[in-house]
Structures are given as structure tokens and as C-alpha cells.
Amino acid sequence: MKFFIDTANIDEIKEANALGILAGVTTNPSLVAKEGVDFHDRLREITQEVTEGSVSAEVVSDDAEGMLREAEELVKIAPNITIKLPMTLEGLKACKALTDQGVKTNVTLVFSANQALLAARAGATYVSPFLGRLDDMGQNGMNLIAEIAEIFDRHAIESQIIAASVRHPMHVTEAALNGAHIATIPLKVIQQLVKHPLTDAGIEKFKNDWEQANK
Ligand code: E4P
């Protein structure tokens, strides 16, 4: 399973990239709105200064025509821009049209296996099931990842599963175990993945032993 970072914050993206683990970036309109910057300028910064990996840029139109118009401008920014489309009838139409043009797509807001299968059949490069938002309403988000992974595997579907709406380290482990190809994760959770109290205690002991021996 690969790691994407789920943010539009350039410093966070740079920090994750410096760890050498970053394969891509996902943004969404809420994350971009928090930054208070021009969306296209931020995408330029991310694609020119940080990563050649997939950078998901979400459209906000309701109809396929509008989505395609937005996508046309977004793909001019860099070759690694992936168009993020909502899981709607219009989103599927736009997905098919962009796939035919050779543009990479990420169908987002996926909450059922049927939605994932439809997105895949419309040619989606990535499908994004939202774990945390399902967990929030008392459903098990991880079961959805497992179902999608089994369906894609059984039918030799090439669309990649991005575990999205990741809230904590267990989501990451379980997404990997259940067959997600990618997890898109906030920086805070990436940093939590690194930490283990036994690692900290081990470093402390090695340092003390070294100091004792070299007095
Ligand atoms: C993924 O592409 C989305 O941007 C994101 O994971 C949504 O996460 P949230 O449910 O924490 O907002």
C-alpha cells in the first residue's frame, strides 16, 4: 500500500515528502478553502515544487459538462494532475469522458461497493471509499474496503482503491491488510505512524549505555 497525503497545505506536503514515503497528494474543496489561497496557484506549487506523483484536484460543478470544463483547465497545470469527481451520475459521465481523453481520475465520496464498481467501469483510475465518515455514522468503513478489494480482484479490475477519510493509525494498518492500494492520510496521522513508545525507550537506553561506556 502506498501513502498519499490528504491536505492542500504546502508545508505539510513538503514535510511528508521529506520523509521519502510520499507517492501523491489528495485535496478536496474543504481542504483548499481552509488554506485561503488560489486553487490553481496551490496546485502549481505542489506539482512544480514537491511531487511528480498523482495530485488529485476536485471539481465542484454538478453537471458533467461543467466538470469537464473545470478539468480542462486543471489538467493544463501539470501532467500529474488527477481529476477528482463526485460519485454521481454526472460524475460517472465525466469520468468516462476524461478516461477516453487519457486523463487520470479519482472518483470520490464512495460509500458502497456498487458505487466503487460503477466508478471502475466508467474508467476511474482511483476510487476513494471514505472510512472515517462511515465509522462516524456507526457503519464499519473497513468492511467496505475489503468488499471493494475482493470485487476488484475477482473481476480483474485495475482501478486502484484509495482508503480515504483516514482518522488514526489502525485505519492505515487495516486498510493495508484489507487490500487498499493507497491510503490518503493527514500529516498528523502520518506522524503518529512513526511513533512507538518502545522505539523512544530503546533510543534512550542506547544513548545512556553509550554515554556510560564512553565516560
Ligand atoms: C479524500 O480524498 C478526502 O479528501 C478525505 O480523505 C476526506 O476526509 P474527511 O472525512 O476526514 O474529511
Image (cartoon, rainbow, N blue to C red):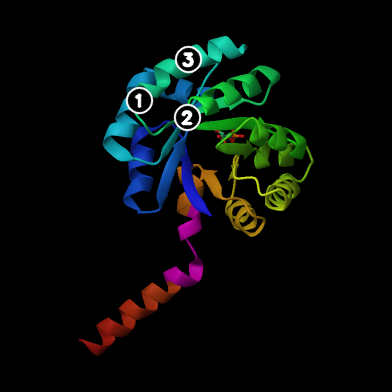
Identified at 21% across, 86% down, the residue is: 214
Q: Which mark is residue 70?
A: 3
> What crowding class fits label 1: few (fewer than 14 Cα within 10 Å), some (14-19), or many (20 or more)?
some
Asked which quadrant contains residue 167, the reply is top right
Question: Which marked residue is nearer to the observer: mark 1 or mark 2?
Answer: 2
Whether residue 166 appears in this view of the structure is no
Question: Which marked residue is nearer to the observer: mark 3 or mark 1?
Answer: 3
Magenta range is: 192-200
Q: Are marks 3 and 1 in contact (CB under 8 Å)?
A: no
Image quarter where the C terminus lies is: bottom left
Q: Which residue is mark 2?
A: 102
| Outermost residue toward the front in this view | 100
Query: Measured from the top left, where is residue 4 in percent x and y?
Result: 47, 44
Q: Secondary structure at mark 2?
A: loop
Q: Amino acid at mark 3?
A: Glu
> What crowding class fits label 3: few (fewer than 14 Cα within 10 Å), some (14-19), or many (20 or more)?
some
View quadrant of ligand 1: top right
Mark positioned earlier in the residue sequence (1 or 2): 1
Question: Which marked residue is nearer to the observer: mark 3 or mark 2?
Answer: 2
Judge left or right: residue 158 versus residue 193: right
Q: Amino acid at mark 1?
A: Arg
Magenta residue check for 159: no
Number of numbered markers:
3
Q: Amino acid at mark 2?
A: Gly
Query: Measured from the top left, where is residue 55 in percent x and y?
Result: 43, 34
Magenta segment, principal secondary structure?
Answer: helix
Q: Is residue 157 above or below residue 111?
A: below
